[in-house]
Image (tube, rainbow, N blue to C red):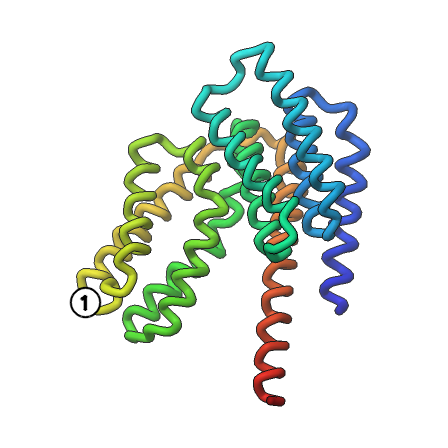
Amino acid sequence: MKIRVIILLILFFGLFLNHTFVNAASPMEKLDKLADEALQLTTLGHDENAKNSLDLFINDFTEMTSNSQFFSMDDIKILLVSHKEAKKAIESSTISTEEKIDKVLSFRLVVDAMNSHYQPLWTELQNPIMTAFSQLKEAVKENDADSYQVILNRFLTQYLLIQPSMKIDVPVDKFQRLDAQISFIDKYRSKIILNDSGLVKLDELEADLQHVFNEMSEDESDPSLWLVIITTGSIIILALSYVGWRKYRGEKYTKQKEHND
């Protein structure tokens, strides 16, 4: 309970700061803050308010792009698809809160990727993604089929969060190679664990993933942007932590119920 209260208090504080500065920001900064606001509201369970923020975003974005050629058509398409998926999730009464947060978080990362000239926020997920991948390799080495399937699904969920953003920031050839490798492992997941060549494939993918993260971290950021990066990055990590906490509570309740039965 204490963990939940702390996370929600920090999110409320971030939402207050975001609302305070959004009207004084430049057009692109305003869009960035609206996307951030939508994520915070979704995490807090305020779906209707989050939907309003998404509606404000798309109205302002449409007006801005109609008057300039600031973004490429490919980037605009990626953003519009991500926005549509986030709004559809928010409006749904059948999907879980965790799924809603994931869709809005993915959209938030896309907006940042389009706006950021330095280290994008999606690189903040490097640690959980690479940790999951290391655990995946261990499961293959130990021939633990059950753990392998669970960890692979977790890795794929985390990858899907950053996939649209990577498509914006990573050179086309490198992104296509990486995406094809991940699709291959997902498609042939049952065969990967059965032979040594599967582990070789995982080693290759791990090296390529790490290389992409390293390249995105090499750019030297403007010191004046570090406060923004740290603040927004913290909100994203908190959103992920909240989702993880809810999943843990759900799994714990299920196990307790099974034990009682």
Snapshot quadrant of residue 29: top right
**Residue placed most toward the observer, 106 or 261:** 261
In this picture, residue 187 sits left or right of residue 118: left
Name the quadrant containing residue 49: top right
Q: On screen, 72 above or below 167? A: above
Query: Can residue 84 be seen here?
Result: yes
Residue 148 horizontal/vertical position (percent): 36, 68
The residue lying furthest to the top in this view is 67
Residue 68 in percent (x, y) is at 56, 11
Is 239 located above or below residue 106 in the figure?
below
Whether residue 172 sits left or right of residue 217 in the image: it is left
Circle 1 is placed at which residue position?
Answer: 195
Q: Quadrant of the N terminus?
A: bottom right
Q: Nearer the viewer, residue 31 or 138?
A: 31
Q: Residue at x 78, y 25 (%)?
A: 23
Local secondary structure at mark 1: loop
Percent position of residue 70, x then y? 53, 16
Residue sitting at 67 percent across and 23 percent down?
A: 59
Residue 207 visible from this viewpoint = no
> Quick check: 75 above or below 107?
above
Kindly identify the residue that appears in the image at 32 percent across and 53 percent down.
206
> How many numbered marks have been drawn onto this rendered protein structure?
1
Dot 1, crowdedness within 10 Å: few (<14), some or many (≥20)? few
Name the amino acid type tagged 1.
Asn
Figure quadrant of the C terminus = bottom right
Q: Is residue 180 left or right of residue 167?
A: left
How far from the left and from the top, in percent, is residue 251? Answer: 58, 73
Write the residue at 43% across / 24% down: 74
Based on the displayed image, in which of its 4 quarters is residue 173 positioned?
A: top left
